[in-house]
Image: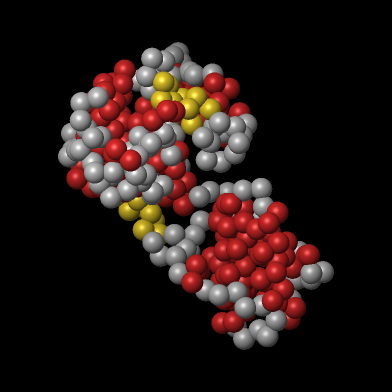
Amino acid sequence: MEKSYEITDDDIVQYVKRRKLRAGDKSTWSRTQEGLRKFQRFLDEFGFNSYEEVDEEDMEMFLDFLLEDGGSDLTVKGLFSTTRVFLQKNDIEAADDVDLTELGDQTLAQQNLKDGIHYVTKEEHQLMRDHYESLREELICELLWSTGIRRSEAASIQLNHIDRDEESIWIDNAKNDDNRIVYYSSNFSRILRKWLDRGGRAQYDKAPDSNYLICTSYSTQVQNKYPNEVVKRVADRAGILDTYAEDAAGRPLHHPTAHSYRHSYAVYRVKNGMNLKFLSLLMGHQSVEVTADNYLHFKQEEIKEANENHRPKF
């Protein structure tokens, strides 16, 4: 697994440290670190004494190394590009002319799933509903379905973030500083009453000491991965948990996940004609363009189908 592979070259180590200090968000630095870990492993496995020894042919070989290591074309392009930037910073042009144009711009989900993203259909969600075994499972899955928030945001909701009169929740945006308000359904409001007012939350030992919406008997706040674990557990029970690919570390990629619910939130609202600006604000995207790039094609499919249905027939 790449996380355990040690970067030993001093120049690479210092570069990664500088990137960590300058990175605008954690994901940017993580991608740099992962790409250069793989580059270090490539150098070690192929007997290079230093990155300064590589030429263009070697970097073509590194690209093949990344492709064989697994991951989507999009991931491989990103990892190679981070390595190319490092080499350029050190006045090495070996990667400059390596052609990446034959690689696609798709994630593993886009390459392996029918619609390109893993969203939960209404039918799948109904199956999930039929297989909840606790109120907490219901709370988490229905929260994700109703609001489209990220799993880390769900884990971070505090009780004073919830406005029950307005049926809204203040969200501390996990991706940027633009905090936002999301709104939940009347169905979720009923679940919330059972959780907060009728003993659902109070049955957990840590509840009296917790300021968070979701707690357990062992922790006042669940980890960011916990909503994902709940979704996969319920989906497995419902018979809809699917493994569609493996990532570069050989770990299975599942559908559905907590993030699948986030996609569902957007897909159904786009199909129903929601204003993209409003949807972008509700989802906490950095721009409307991000929302459009990810989801507008679902509306285009509806338009195409409508056109076919109303085409004059002979």
* 130 lies above or below 92: above
Q: Residue at x 78, y 65 (%)?
A: 88
* 64 lies above or below 195: below
Q: Which residue is at the far right?
A: 91
Nearer to me, 140 or 40: 140
x and y percentages locating residue 211 in the rendered image = 38, 36
Relative to residue 242, is residue 91 drawn left or right?
Answer: right
The answer to whether residue 39 of the structure is visible from this angle is yes
Nearer to me, 82 or 74: 82
* 243 lies above or below 165: below
x and y percentages locating residue 22 in the rendered image = 70, 54
> What is the number of callouts on the image?
0
Q: Residue at x 46, y 52 (%)?
A: 108
Report the coloring of the rendering: secondary structure
Relative to residue 49, is residue 224 drawn left or right?
Answer: left
The answer to whether residue 239 of the structure is visible from this angle is no
Q: Which residue is at the far front?
A: 209
Nearer to me, 306 or 260: 260
Q: Residue at x 49, y 72 (%)?
A: 4
Relative to residue 4, is residue 190 drawn left or right?
Answer: left
- The quarter of the rendered structure image containing the N terminus is bottom left
- The quarter of the rendered structure image containing the C terminus is top left
Q: Quadrant of residue 284?
A: top right
Relative to residue 295, is residue 12 drawn left or right?
Answer: right
* 59 lies above or below 107: below
x and y percentages locating residue 130 in the rendered image = 18, 34
x and y percentages locating residue 306 in the rendered image = 44, 18
Q: Quadrant of residue 137?
A: top left
Q: Residue at x 35, y 31 (%)?
A: 143
